[in-house]
């Protein structure tokens, strides 16, 4: 099997997995406006780590369009918001990781991407959310800091934690299946790997607790 065919095969698998995650796993966080967490961006950012930011873009567009035509009720604007939200996170993280393919590069990329995506989505929420939800722009502006800001920080933080936890095992599994070449560098020690795993678990656990607490508050 040629390298290009292997790449397309893996990306198709990632797109199918991302679609399945957003179809089956949507955890409501905020009732009004309806905001939910789904882990599809974890898969898309890992695709970017493996093949570069353009691969994240391609998978994001494909999954968002499939979501729009199958079960989403937000139409073209919702599809556009999905693409912007995913790409501002996944493409940013994978672009930084592409420049520095180390464990630290991945961590820095994910942190920067989480902050960048949160800022981008505040801007897009202000301008686009009123168009497809029917909410007055003034009402959306009032919700930017108390609702959209913590939600997007929570979402990107969880995605970053899951991505750090799952990237290396998934990459090794694909390499063993001969769908990827063996890793040629940036191999971390067992202590560093354990530290990253523990930190990722801590971030994920904290995010889950915040979701539970926030839902009770709201």
Image (tube, rainbow, N blue to C red):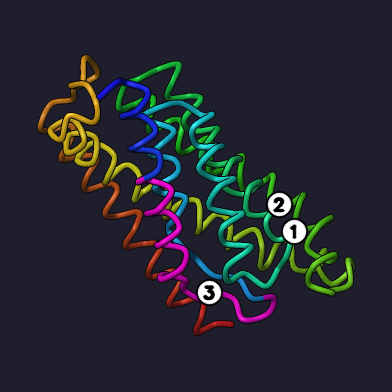
Q: Earlier in the sequence, mark 3 or mark 2?
A: 3
Q: CA distance from mark 3 to mark 2?
A: 21 Å
- Local SS, label 1: helix
Give the image quarter of residue 2: top left
- Local SS, label 3: strand
Residue at position x 42%, y 58% from top? 39
Q: Which mark is residue 29?
A: 3
Is 43 placed left or right of 192 in the picture?
right
Looking at this view, is 155 or 218 the one in front?
155
Q: Which mark is residue 76?
A: 1
Give the image quarter of residue 152: bottom right
Looking at this view, is 4 or 51 the one in front?
4
In this rendering, the label closer to the viewer, 1 or 2: 1
Looking at this view, is 165 or 178 the one in front?
178
In this rendering, the label closer to the viewer, 3 or 2: 2
- Local SS, label 2: helix
Is 139 placed left or right of 181 in the picture?
right
Is 116 placed left or right of 210 in the picture?
right
Residue 58 position within the rendered picture, expressed as x and y whole percent measured from the top left: 54, 38
Mark 2 Cα-neighbour bin, 10 Å: few <14, some 14–19, many ≥20: some
Q: CA distance from mark 1 to mark 3?
A: 23 Å
- Residue at numbered disc 2: 80
Residue 69 located within the stretch drawn in magenta: no
Q: CA distance from mark 1 to mark 2?
A: 6 Å
Residue at position x 49%, y 65% from top? 37
| Image quadrant occupied by the N terminus | top left
Residue 103 position within the rendered picture, expressed as x and y whole percent measured from the top left: 30, 27
In this rendering, the label closer to the viewer, 1 or 3: 1
Magenta residues, as a range?
13-33
Residue at position x 64%, y 58% from top? 149
């Amino acid at each position: 099997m040629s390298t290009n065919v292997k790449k397309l095969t893996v990306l198709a698998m990632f797109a199918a997995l991302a679609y399945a995650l957003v179809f089956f796993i949507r955890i409501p966080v905020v009732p009004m406006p309806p905001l939910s967490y789904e882990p599809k961006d974890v898969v898309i950012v890992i695709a970017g780590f493996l093949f570069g930011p353009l691969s994240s873009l391609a998978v994001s567009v494909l999954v968002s369009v499939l979501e729009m035509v199958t079960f989403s009720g937000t139409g073209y604007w919702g599809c556009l918001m999905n693409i912007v939200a995913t790409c501002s996170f996944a493409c940013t993280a994978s672009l930084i990781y592409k420049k520095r393919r180390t464990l630290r590069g991945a961590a820095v990329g994910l942190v920067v991407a989480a902050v960048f995506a949160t800022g981008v989505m505040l801007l897009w929420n202000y301008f686009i959310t009123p168009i497809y939800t029917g909410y007055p722009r003034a009402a959306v502006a009032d919700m930017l800091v108390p609702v959209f800001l913590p939600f997007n920080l929570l979402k990107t933080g969880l995605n970053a934690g899951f991505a750090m936890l799952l990237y290396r095992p998934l990459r090794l599994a694909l390499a063993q299946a001969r769908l990827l070449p063996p890793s040629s560098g940036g191999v971390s020690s067992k202590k560093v790997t354990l530290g990253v795993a523990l930190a990722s678990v801590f971030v994920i656990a904290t995010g889950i607790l915040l979701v539970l607490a926030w839902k009770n508050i709201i």
